Amino acid sequence: MTRWFPTLRRPQPPAAKGELDYTLNWAPAGIDRARPWSVERAVRDGMERAVWIYKAVDTISNHAANRLLRVRPRSDSSDEPLPPLANHPLYEAMNVNANPLEVAFILKKRLSMQLLLSKRGVFLEPTFSRGGDLLRIDLLPPGRTRPIPGKGADLVSHFETVTPTGELRTLDVDRVRWIRNPHPLDPYAGITPLEAAGLSADLDFFTRHYNLSFVHNDARPGGVIGIDGDMDDAELRLLRAKFAGGPSAAGAWTVLSGGNVTVTDTSTTPRDMAYESVSLNSKVELLAAFGVPESQLGNASGRTYDNAQAEKLIFWEVTMPPHLSLLAAAFQTDAGDRNEVYFDTSDIDVLRTARSKRLTEAREEVAAGVRSVRSYAELAGYADEVDDTPATRALYLASGRTPVPARAADAQALTPTTPVAQPPRPAKALAPAADLPLDDTAAETLHGRLDDALQALAVRWTERTVARLSSPRHRKGTRHWDHRGADAPRTGIKDLPIELVVDLATWQQEAAQALRPLIEAAAVGAAADLSDALGMPGTEPDTVWPVLGPLIADWLTNYAAALAEDIRDADRSGKDLAGITTSARDWGQSFSAWATVTARRLATATIEMGRDHAAAASMRAGLVRRWVAHDDGRTRPDHEAADGQTQPLGHPFTIGQDLLRHPADPQAPPGQALNCRCRLAWRIQH
C-alpha cells in the first residue's frame, strides 16, 4: 500500500519537548472521544485537504460572520419580538471591533469555524473594565484549552489554557464562555459533522490520491510490454522513452514495428471506474453532514430556480438557525437577565417571504379591528414612525366607529368628554307634581357606545380564536397538523388545546379596559344630572363598576365555556380545521347578538344606579321615583302593568312576581332585566 499511497508512510512529527499534547492525552470523564477527530486533525485532514469540507465550513462561517448580533428585551406578554437595543456593549464588540487584532467579522468567522470543527468546543474570553464595561472578546485556542471537571454539583471547576509561549493559564468559570454542539453522553465534549462523516472525508481524499497516482503514472504502469529477444542498452532507452510516464502520456498507446511483441493492458479496470461513484457518494455524505446544499456553495447547475430557492430556504431554516443559536447563547450571560441575544436574519430574502405573509395577515387584522395600528407598526419594524398614543393603541371596527381603548388610562382620551357640571346652586323650590328635568336619552346614548365596544371585542375574540386554531404551535400533535393527514411527521391524536385557544383571562381584562371607562363616565354624568336638577352638590358614584364588573366577568366565563365546548365537539366529531373555524365564527355571530342585548341592560343599569347614588347623597326629603314603560307594543306585560308605579327612594318596584330596584336591575331575573327599555322619572313629593 505504501507504493500506491506514499503519504501513508509519512512519519508523524514528534511533539516538542515539554509541550503538552492535550489532543491525545486528555480525556474528559475518562473517555477519549476527542482523539479520532481533534480540531487539529479536522483542520489538517478535513478542511485543508477536502474541497467539500472546506467549502461547507467556509459557507456556513461566512453567513454567520455576516449576521449582526443584536440584543433585545424579552417579550413575556406577546409572541412578537420586541425591537433591539441600540447601544448595548455587545453590539460594538461583535459587530465592529472584537479586539485590537481582529475585527468582528474575523472573530465571528473563526468562532463559527471552530464550532464546526472542534470536538472540544469553542472557548471565548471576554475582558471587562473595573466598572463592568465590556472591552474586548478573544478566542482561546481550542486544542490547548480544556475544562477541568468540578466536584459535586459543579460541572466545571475552572478552565486551563496553554499560551503560545508554553505558559499554563488558569481561568475562572465566569471568565470563559464555552460553546459546543452538545454530546449526548459526555458533557465535557461536543460533536462535529466530521464525527459522522469522517469515513467519507477519508474516502474522498484517498480516491483522489489514488486517481492522482494513476494520472502521474508512477504508482502503476498503464501497460506491460514484453520483447522476445535481447536488446542492447540504446534500444532499451529508446523504447522506454516512447512510453515515458507523466500526465500527457497517461493511458496512451504506441505502435511498434518488428519482432515479437506482447502487450498487457493494465490501465483501466472496473475498480478504477468505481472512483467516480465513490467520489460522488463522499460529496453527498459530507454536504449532508454539514447541512449545506450544493447550490449554496455556488453550483446550481442541474437545478431549476424554484429548486435552488427551496434549497436556500432549507439551508436558512434547518442548518443556520441552530448554528446561530449556539453562537448567540454564549453571550446570554453578558446580555442581562431581561434581554436575549440573537443574530439578525431579517434581510434574508427567502425568510422575508414568510414575514411578508405575516404582515399581510396583520394588516387584515387591523382592518378587522383585532389589531391596533401601533401593534402593526412594531411588527413591521417602524414603530419609531408611529407615536404610541391612545388612538394608535386602540382598536377600530371596519366602519370606523367608536374606538376600543387598549388600557384604562386611554379611555379619557378616546371617550367623548362629559360636560362639566356647573357649580352647585342653592336648592330651588320644585312644583310637587313636576318631574325633574333629566336627560331621557342618557341610557340610549350609552347603549350605543357599549354596543360598539362589545361588537369590536366580539370580532377581536373571534378572529383571535380562529388565528390560534390555525397556529402550528397549537396544531402540533393533533390530526390537524398537515394536509397530508396521518402521514405528516408531527400529526398526532391529541385534542386541540382549548385552554390556549380560548383565552378567558385576556377576554376579561380587555372587557374591563374597554367597558369600565364608558360605564364610570356615564354614571358620573347621570349623578351630576340629578344633582344639578336638585340644585345640590353632587358626588361621584363609586358603586357602579364594582357591581357590574363581576357580572360581566361571569357572563364572559359562560360564553367562553360555550365556545370551548363548540370547538371541542366539532373537533371530536371529526370536522376538519375549516369546519371548526366555521363553528367558532358561528359562535361569534351569537355573541354579537348577545352583546347588543347586554349593552342595553348595562346602559340602563348604569344610568339608574348613578342617579340612585346621587339621590342618596343629596339627602333630599320627598324624593320618589315613577316607573315609565316604553309604549310601542313590544313591552313585557309585567313592565307595562307597572307603568306609573311610584316608590320612595330605596324601595323596590313590584314587577310581576319580582322586586326590582330599577329597570335592568343586575340582581333581577334575566327575564325581567334583559333588553329592558323602561326608565324612571323623579319628582319631589310632599
Image: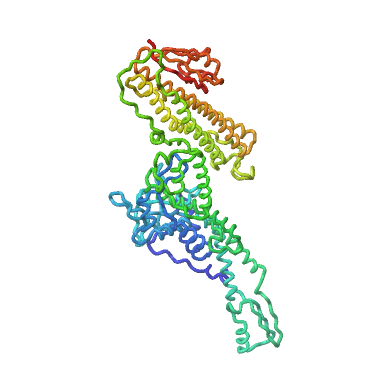
Image location of residue 196, percent across then percent down: 54, 55
Q: Which part of the image, by quadrant, shows the N terminus?
A: bottom right
**From this viewpoint, is residue 525 visible?**
yes
Corner quadrant of residue 496 = top right
Residue located at (48% from left, 17% from top): 628
Direction from residue 80 to residue 477 in the image, left or right: right
In the rendered image, the residue lying farthest to the top is 686
Q: Identify which residue, 167 or 190, lies in the foreground.
A: 190
Direction from residue 611 to residue 4 in the image, left or right: right
Corner quadrant of residue 289 = bottom right
**Is 370 situated above or below 261?**
above
**Is 577 situated above or below 447?**
below
Q: Identify which residue, 138 or 575, lies in the foreground.
A: 575
Direction from residue 606 to residue 574 in the image, left or right: right
Q: Identify which residue, 243 or 363, lies in the foreground.
A: 363
Corner quadrant of residue 685 = top left
Scheme of colours in the image: rainbow
Image location of residue 374, percent across then percent down: 43, 43
Q: Identify which residue, 634 or 208, lies in the foreground.
A: 634
